[in-house]
Image (tube, rainbow, N blue to C red):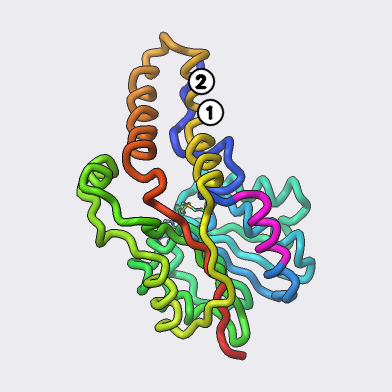
Amino acid sequence: MTTPPKLGAGTRLDFHGPLSADRAGRLVAELAARAPATVVDYGCGWGEFLLRVMAAAPGAQGTGIDVHGPDIVRGRALAAERGLSGRAVFVEGPAADHTEPADLVLSLGAYQAFGSIPEALQALRARVSPGGRLLFGCEVWERTPTESQLAAMWPGMTVEECLYLPDVVDAAVAAGFRPLRVETATRGEWEEFESGYGADAEEWLLANPGHPEAADLRAQLDEHLSIWLRGTRDVFGFGYLTLGVPA
Ligand SMILES: C[S@@+](CC[C@H](N)C(=O)[O-])C[C@H]1O[C@@H](n2cnc3c(N)ncnc32)[C@H](O)[C@@H]1O
């Protein structure tokens, strides 16, 4: 009997966040054009963005760090497929354990590895070499959620759990960065991400409706869909900040 896919494994996603191929391509090109010698991705997931930077910056050595073992395994396999294993190393463990500064630092959807957004920006500032760059991606409030939207998100979710975009930029400046680019995900990027998140599980359910684990998976998918459609849709945004530090 087939095993159900694990919701959130992201097997149908390129990135574990609302990031289109177009935006990723432009950001990768801009960051790689500076020819970083070292690149570190804190909370890399399976490292798709890191690997695209490595492909575009042939002189770079890259390290991806994540606590989630299956993503590290997937990252290593992707690196091997693309002939990048010699330059892209994947390390399983907490981001905070790694302090070596790099020319290019990535933190996409993973600030929690260092605490709050201001705490993460402070920690990441110490990990960017002089003249280097940080690409920082995080959730922001696109607009203030109503009480019913908050209640439809996760238990205990409050307005204080997330910042507005200008406050994230202020926190970056306070940490010692200058904002070179400030951009936000489109509704289309969110729709691709949220639909892709459960796509493998939805198809498995259609093929295995009578499986003993089908009801449980269906309940998880329904909950995910409700959080998105009744809670976060058009309320949760995602900011991408390209941040520079002085030489
Ligand atoms: C939303 S995913 C983003 C993954 C990847 N950056 C991307 O954009 O595709 C957040 C990642 O942060 C990782 N993470 C969470 N806490 C961490 C920690 N303390 N140290 C390292 N990674 C962590 C999770 O395991 C997860 O893979």
The residue drawn where x is 48% and y is 32% is 198
Q: Mark 2 falls on what kind of element?
A: helix
Decide if residue 191 is in sight here. yes
User: Which residue corresponds to the image point at 26% horizontal and 40% vertical from the top-left?
Assistant: 152
* Residue 170 on image: x %, y %: 40, 78
Q: Is residue 117 left or right of residue 69?
A: left
For the residue pair 81 and 13, the one nearer the viewer reads as 13
Is 206 displayed left or right of 79 in the figure?
left
| Quarter holding residue 102 | bottom right
Residue at 33% in and 67% down: 116
Q: Is mark 2 within 8 Å of ligand 1?
A: no
Query: Residue 55, which numbered label?
Result: none
Any magenta on residue 210? no
Q: Is residue 63 above or below residue 212?
A: below
Residue corresponding to mark 1: 200
Q: Identify the residue position indicated by label 2 in the image.
A: 204
Image coordinates of residue 232 in percent, x first then y, are: 36, 45
Crowding near the residue tagged with mark 2, few <14, some 14–19, many ≥20 C-alpha atoms within 10 Å: some
Distance, label 1 to label 2, CA atoms, is 6 Å
Q: Amino acid at mark 2?
A: Trp
Q: Residue at x 61, y 80 (%)?
A: 132
Residue 180, percent from left and from top: 58, 76
Residues shaded magenta: 20-29
